[in-house]
Image: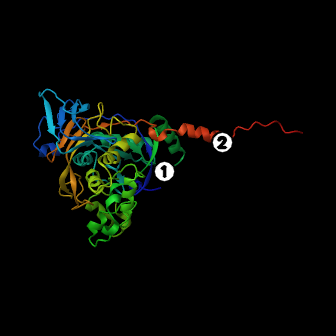
Amino acid sequence: MTTPCRLGGLLLLLLLGAVAVAIAASHPANEFCAAAGGGAGCGGGGDGARILIKGGTVVNAHRAEEADVYIEDGVVIAVRPNIRVGDDNVKVIDATGKFVMPGGIDPHTHLEMEFMGTVTIDDFFSGHAAALAGGTTMHIDFVIPVNGNLTAGLESYKQKAEKSAMDYGFHMAITKWNDDVSREMESMVKDHGQKVIGEPVVSGLVLNDSWLWDPDFTIASKYVMSPPIRQAGHNKALQLALSSGVLPLVGTDHCTFNSTQKAFGFDDFRKIPNGVNGIEERMHIIWDSMAETGQISGTDYVRVTSTECAKIFNIYPRKGAILEGSDADMIILNPKRSFVMGAHTHHSRSNTNVYEGRKGKGMVEVTISRGRVVWEDGILNIVPGSGRYIRTPPFGYLFDGTEKSDAAYRASLRAPVQRGKASA
């Protein structure tokens, strides 16, 4: 079987168990609030905040329109031009000349995962901090079974997620197969559903294998992932597949290790923990490499970073859209601002970044999660334990038509065949 991080790559078939879990926890104030001088109000004011976003271009996967957005109690109340509300206790954000888009949904991450004798450096707090700073407001993490046991794996990840700071869901990874796993799978599928999808990861869209040959081990090792980053040219093919709709969405396979962990393989590359960062960088990289270059439109950008994932996991239009009644998860992106990526500015706990020094256009200036402003003016405003598990109901649009198809196939067999008794 492939190891957990090997589940990521250029094109991936994922067996996904949408696991229903309720998780709630409360925790003390965190490092980012403390660094920003936050006090009792740290955490964005809670889901009861009232926000009016004025003058922006609201971009959904199906259309873009000039409109205001009014948010209350963590939900989108209205999307239309010239919204007027009372000024009392309403935060007004001017989005003139900017895009108001659904927050990103990352379908492929590995937070606090035990792997190759160590644990990924980002947990459900630091990973969420990085995600929100980069415009992603929900992710779906892989649950790794404990000694092949699915239920034990799920219980472990429920505990890990107690420090979460944004919405999240779970996949179930299958790392071995026997009769016990088969029975557990049957239970998981019956209770929670299953889906099969394909996805590229953002590193495959923009990186090539030249970095793997750098004479500096620290630099070369940070690019080690599975499947490996390919030679130049493969990324262009993936970009074409994404722009043409052959590939429907983009994940990250965010699976981070610091330079000390990577050094486990200094004398034997097979011992280098496999994995790269991306949960904070994905939204910016896709905008700069795909939308800014004209390969995809703004509506396509929303589709591949948010809406398609929401549809696949059967949570659209609650997620992946800015519509009346949708969760108030959104970003304000300034297409004129530039960015520079690197370990000195990112929010991951890793001391390396595979996109070190990468420059581009299109900056996420504001991130709103469940009606709370959690990223603004370069400051995170989050608390651990404020995250929420999002159930992904089974049988989304991927299953449309399967009953008719199965019935047609059974009919083609002309079974059962009625035969008389053989003559003596």
Q: Position of residue 93 (x, y in %)?
A: 15, 38
Q: Position of residue 211 (x, y in %)?
A: 30, 68
Q: Quadrant of the C terminus?
A: top right
Pointer 1: what residue?
Answer: 176
Q: Position of residue 287 (x, y in %)?
A: 27, 52
Q: Residue at x 38, y 57 (%)?
A: 240
Judge by depth and name the residue closer to the eye, 312 or 23.
312
Assign a secondary structure to mark 1: loop
Q: Residue at x 55, y 37 (%)?
A: 403
Q: Residue at x 30, y 65 (%)?
A: 221
Colour style of the rendered protein structure: rainbow
Judge by depth and name the residue closer to the eye, 1 or 223.
223
Q: Indicate which disc residue 412 carries.
A: 2
Q: Does 211 sit above or below residue 59?
A: below
Judge by depth and name the residue closer to the eye, 214 or 150.
214
Q: Position of residue 150 (x, y in %)?
A: 44, 43
